[in-house]
Image: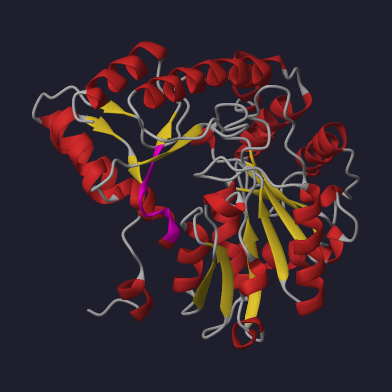
C-alpha cells in the first residue's frame, strides 16, 4: 500500500524519537534522568480531580458531548479571559473547546490552508506549526529569530511572493522553547501586518500562566483590532498540570472560530463532558495552585541557570515557561550534544534544531523534574562539559 505523499515530507515527531531512545536505555536497566518533554511532575490539583470524580458519575455526561464544548465550559473560558486579561468574549461565538491546544493548532491548517499555500512560522517554535502545513501539502516560511532580536520572529522580512500565498502566521509568546516574551508594541505590529495582508494571526498562549518574578504574560486579544485577525490558543496542560487530560480552548475572531469548529465537527466528536467540568473547576476555582507551581518552577529555573552558568554554559534566565534554552559547547551541534548527554550522562534534553532551522546550536531543558534529580542531572552534565 502507499501512504499519502505528505507523510514523506513530515519529520518524525521530536518527542517520539526521544522517548524511544530513553526507553531503550531504561530497558537495559540504566537510570535515565529526563529533562526533555515538558510534562509536569506534580499531580493535577485535588479540587480538579474531585470535580472530575463527581462529573464522571453523571449519566448525562456519558453521551456524546457538544461539538463546540458545553456552554458552561465556554462560559468558564470567558470568565478566565475576563479575570486574567480583561478581555470580553462571547462564549457562543468566540470560544471553542479543544482536545488540547495541539489538536486545535493542527486542525487550524485544515480550516484555512490549501495545497501550495504558505504558513508563516517562527524559525524556532512548536513543531506543529509547520507539521500541520506539511500535512496539508502546503509550505512553511520560517520567520527569522535569534538572540539578537530577542527571539521575536521577524515577519517584516517575508518575501512578497510568499505573502501573496500566506494564510496563517503563527506566533507563541511566552515562547516554547526559548522562553522569550513579546512586548505590546510587537503584538501591535504583528496585528497591523496581518490585517494589511489578510492573514490569520494564530497566537499560541499555552504558557501564559507560568511566569516569574512578577511578570504577567499578556493575551494578544488585549491589543486593539486583535479580533479582526487573531485566534488565540490556550491549554490547561501546564497551568493546572493537566497534560494527560487533553483540554484547552481557542478564542478570538468569530470567523476563525467558526471555521475551526466546522473542521472539528467533521473530524472529532468533542471532548468528554466530564473533563470539561474538571476544566471549569480549574478555570474558575482557586488559582493558588498555579501560584505555587510558578514558585516551584522559579526555584528550579534558578537552580538550573546558576548551575549551567557555573559550568560556563551560556543560557538566559526566562521570565516565563517551564524551559531553559541553553547554548551547546563550542564544537558541538544540538544533535551531537543531546546524543552525548543521553548516551554518556544518561540525561535527556531536547536538541534545539528540532524546533526549527534557527534552533541549531541550542538545547532545551525542561524544569518538570524534582529538584534532587535536576541537581544530579547537572552533576552528570558537568562530567562532559
**Image location (x, y in percent) of residue 351:** 33, 47
Q: Which quadrant of the rendered structure holds the N terminus?
A: bottom left
Q: Which quadrant of the rendered structure holds the C terminus?
A: top left
- Is residue 345 among the parts visible in the rendering? yes
Residue at point 45% right, 26% down? 367
Q: For residue 158, what is the image quadrant?
A: bottom right
Q: Residue furthest left?
A: 28
- Is residue 269 among the parts visible in the rendering? no
Relative vertical location of residue 148 with respect to residue 297 in this rendering, above or below: below
Q: How many marks?
A: 0
338 with respect to 25 (left or right): right
Q: For residue 305, what is the image quadrant?
A: top left
Residue at point 45% right, 32% down? 39
**Image location (x, y in percent) of residue 225:** 89, 61
**Image location (x, y in percent) of residue 156:** 67, 71
Question: Is residue 361 within the magenta segment?
Answer: yes
15 with respect to 211 (left or right): left
185 with respect to 29 (left or right): right
Relative vertical location of residue 68 with respect to residue 24 in this rendering, above or below: below
Q: How is the image coloured?
A: secondary structure
**Image location (x, y in percent) of residue 318:** 57, 33
Question: Is residue 120 within the magenta segment?
Answer: no
Relative vertical location of residue 281 with respect to residue 190 in this rendering, above or below: above
Relative vertical location of residue 150 with respect to residue 293 in this rendering, above or below: below
Identify which residue, 337 or 82, lies in the foreground. 337
Span colored in magenta: 358-364
Residue at point 48% right, 26% down? 40
Residue at point 60% right, 54% down? 149
Amino acid at each position: 500500500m502507499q501512504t499519502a505523499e505528505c507523510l514523506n515530507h513530515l519529520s518524525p515527531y521530536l518527542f517520539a524519537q526521544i522517548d524511544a531512545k530513553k526507553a531503550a536505555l531504561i530497558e537495559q536497566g540504566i537510570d535515565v534522568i529526563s529533562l526533555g518533554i515538558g510534562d509536569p511532575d506534580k499531580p493535577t490539583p485535588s479540587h480538579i480531580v474531585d470535580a472530575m470524580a463527581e462529573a464522571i458519575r453523571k449519566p448525562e455526561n456519558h453521551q456524546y458531548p457538544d461539538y463546540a464544548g458545553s456552554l458552561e465550559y465556554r462560559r468558564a473560558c470567558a470568565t478566565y479571559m475576563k479575570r486574567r486579561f480583561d478581555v470580553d468574549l462571547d462564549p457562543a461565538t468566540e470560544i471553542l473547546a479543544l482536545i488540547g491546544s495541539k489538536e486545535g493548532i493542527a486542525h487550524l491548517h485544515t480550516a484555512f490552508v490549501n495545497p501550495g499555500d504558505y504558513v508563516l512560522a517562527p524559525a524556532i517554535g512548536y513543531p506543529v506549526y509547520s507539521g500541520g502545513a506539511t500535512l496539508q501539502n502546503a509550505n512553511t516560511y520560517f520567520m527569522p529569530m535569534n538572540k539578537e532580536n530577542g527571539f521575536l520572529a521577524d515577519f517584516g522580512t517575508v518575501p512578497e511572493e510568499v505573502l501573496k500565498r500566506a494564510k496563517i502566521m503563527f506566533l507563541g509568546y511566552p515562547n516554547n522553547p526559548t522562553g522569550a516574551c513579546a512586548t505590546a508594541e510587537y503584538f501591535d505590529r504583528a496585528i497591523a501586518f496581518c490585517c494589511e495582508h489578510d492573514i490569520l494571526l494564530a497566537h499560541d498562549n499555552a504558557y501564559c500562566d507560568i511566569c516569574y518574578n512578577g511578570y504577567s504574560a499578556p493575551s494578544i486579544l488585549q491589543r486593539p483590532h486583535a479580533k479582526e485577525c487573531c485566534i488565540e490558543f490556550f491549554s490547561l496542560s501546564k497551568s493546572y498540570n493537566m497534560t494527560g487530560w487533553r483540554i484547552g480552548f481557542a478564542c478570538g475572531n468569530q470567523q476563525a472560530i467558526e471555521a475551526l469548529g466546522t473542521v472539528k465537527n467533521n473530524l472529532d466528536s468533542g471532548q468528554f463532558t466530564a473533563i470539561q467540568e474538571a476544566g471549569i473547576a480549574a478555570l474558575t476555582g482557586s488559582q493558588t495552585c498555579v501560584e505555587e507551581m510558578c514558585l516551584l518552577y522559579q526555584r528550579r529555573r534558578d537552580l538550573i541557570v546558576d548551575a549551567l552558568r557555573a559550568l560556563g554554559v551560556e543560557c538566559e534566565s526566562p521570565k516565563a515557561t517551564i524551559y531553559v534554552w541553553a547554548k551547546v559547547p563550542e564544537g558541538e551541534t544540538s544533535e551531537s550534544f543531546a546524543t552525548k548527554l543521553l548516551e554518556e550522562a544518561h540525561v535527556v534534553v531536547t536538541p534545539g534544531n528540532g524546533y526549527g532551522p534557527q534552533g541549531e546550536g541550542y538545547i532545551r531543558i525542561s524544569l518538570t523534574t524534582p529538584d534532587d534529580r535536576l541537581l544530579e542531572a547537572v552533576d552528570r552534565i558537568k562530567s562532559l562539559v
